Image (tube, grey):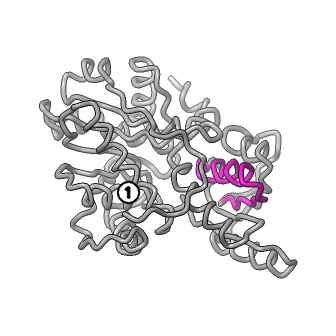
Amino acid sequence: MKNRERFPLAHLPTPLEPMQRLTNALGGAELWIKRDDQTGLATGGNKTRKLEYLIADALAQGADLVLTVGAAQSNHCRQTAAAAARAGLECVVVLGSEPLPRERWTGNLLLDDLLGARVVWAGDEEPMAVMEATAEAERVSGRNTYTIPYGGSNAIGASAYALAFQEVVEQVAAGDMAPFDRVVFASSSGGTQAGLVIGARASGYKGQVLGISVHRTNDQLRELVTSLLAPTAAYLGLELSLGPGDVDVDDGYIGPGYGIMTEGVRGAVRQVAELEGILLDPVYAGKAMSGLLALVQRGDIGADERVLFWHTGGVPALFAYAKDLLAE
């Protein structure tokens, strides 16, 4: 894989740890966790890896203003704001909801503000369109803008997770461990999964790379991830033949919709916290963990398997979901 320009932000490699107490409690597969909640930037998360390459590209293009888009409790927006601050760039985050009064700003939204980002509320308009219109207005006023899509999920951002998969391969080899049979994680904007699929193929990995959808149907998510495979591989200088058949997704744990608490998510967040001392957010990692636990408990994942859960971060969102988490 080609070495691309990187703006250092993340604490790498992130830890690879056994979840022995959770494994014992389930009585099934041997569970491990990749701690990308510990990438280090403004409480960490998977987007930090992507932003190392996106911010490097922004700086190379002479940008002085970065704009991105997400939900009100977007982990990506929070990490983008922090990355921009580190790089000396101004930041605008376009949030896809009606405006919230400042006294209700908590979790990631509070951190966006502390990190110096300017918040633009999309209201009932399409957030990407609002971001592009905002960027155009800034360009007219003389700013050099750089726009980043949802989740940092383009070829540049996704490439970081092809390299991240190689990081795991090296950790497994250094620890003289058997390879994992499956890698399981939350999948939403598609970039993390596209990168992991490419990294898995490039390294010769034979196991499953399974994205647990947090809001898209299987067909929608598979199409989105597939659309990123060819441009990301090309960006990395790889000649790989990949298609929809290489993208494994599971939309069985979405519940009522994006960011809406379910009993499975509440239970997964509590169980992992109580048994392993690890915090999962209820929107992404918690939802993915609820899926993994169900797959193990049903026997869809065999008791003889070794499974890696990739923690994508998002802990600040816990504070925005306190009422739901504390519900009896």
Give the amino acid type for the residue marked by disc 1 in the picture.
Answer: Ala
**Does 327 sit left or right of 272 as displayed?**
right
Pick whichever, 22 or 264, lies toward us: 22
Tell me the residue at 26%/23% (across/down).
Answer: 23
The location of residue 204, given as percent across then percent down, is 20, 55
- Above or below — where is 134 with respect to 283? below
Say which quarter of the image contains residue 2: bottom left
Please identify the quarter of the rendering in which residue 104 is found.
Answer: top right
Residue 234 or residue 317, whichever sits in front = 234
Residue 201: give x, y in percent of width and height.
25, 60
Q: For residue 109: magenta?
A: no
Residue 264: x, y in percent?
38, 35
Front residue of 177 and 293 = 177
Please name the residue that numbered disc 1 is placed on: 162
Whether residue 172 sits left or right of residue 258 in the image: it is left
Q: Residue at x 70, y 64 (%)?
A: 67
Residue located 55% across and 62% down the image: 5
Q: Position of residue 100 (x, y in %)?
A: 76, 49
User: Quadrant where the N terminus lies?
Assistant: bottom left
Quarter of the rendering containing residue 159: bottom left
Question: Would residue 79 be counted in the magenta stretch?
Answer: yes
| Magenta segment boundaries in residue numbering | 74-95
Relative height, residue 156 to residue 317 (above, below): below
**Residue 131 to residue 160: above or below:** below
